[in-house]
Image: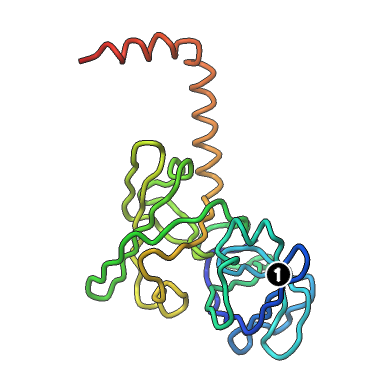
Amino acid sequence: MFTGIVQGIARVVALRDRPGLRSFTLQFPAGFCAGLEIGASVAIDGTCLTVTALPGPDTADFDVMQQTLALTTLGALREGGRINAERSAREGVEIGGHILSGHVDAQATVAAIRRPENNHVLRFAVPAPWMRYVFAKGFIAVNGASLTVAEAGREPGGSGWFEVWLIPETLRMTTFGDKVEGDTVNLEIERQTQVIVDTVERMLEERLGPLRPALEKLLAQQP
């Protein structure tokens, strides 16, 4: 479990491909690895990974399966790359963001960047069907950071976009200041929102399903 509060920026110092997976060696900020043990969970750009070795001070190794490489942005990481990092939450920790599992749902694309005074606005393009779970003023995790959706819009076909406004402190503690238009990011949908949306849609389908053909015919007749 994670809280969505990024604790530091890690850097890829080495990567090695092996049959069925890729191993990463990451360098963390000083003190980040204090008390870290093999088998512990760390969120890397929002993806929950397991520590497989501790080769040196403030460094840790992780193995990433091919499926994870394909479904997340980790497959595009190269030596020197910078990523958001958060250690797993401990019992009694303050939840400054919202509860995250570290299981990435989809990738989004940076569609536009604006820079009002003392702010940094990122607009993300979201593929279908994930936009159904994104609402203005709701939570979403982007590269492991718990963010509040400022604006959101839906497009035909189920895709859409949302915007987040970032203050200087968020830019300092994360890699969002590095992003340019066209970059991809990892998304984790807020689970409570997902459960509510799916439950309501299922109930409506159960109650209105038999009426769907008649409703569609009626709508088709409207000018």
Q: Splitting the image into 4 quarters, where does residue 164 fall? A: bottom left
- The residue tagged 1 is 22
Q: State the SS at label 1.
A: strand
Q: Residue, x 55% and y 76% (percent of image)?
A: 7
Where's residue 151, x and y in %? 31, 52
As drawn, which residue projects farthest toward the left?
Answer: 223
Residue pictured at 47% horizontal, 78% vertical: 173
Q: Quadrant of the N terminus?
A: bottom right
Q: Residue at x 38, y 57 (%)?
A: 124
Q: Find residue 208 and report its horizontal and vertical position in percent.
A: 47, 15
Where does the C terminus fall, quadrant-wise? top left
Residue 42 appears left or right of 149: right
Q: Quadrant of residue 46?
A: bottom right
Q: Nearer the viewer, residue 45 or 140?
A: 45
- Callout 1, which amino acid? Arg
Crowding near pointer 1: few (<14 within 10 Å), some, many (20+)? some
Image coordinates of residue 205 in percent, x first then y, are 51, 21
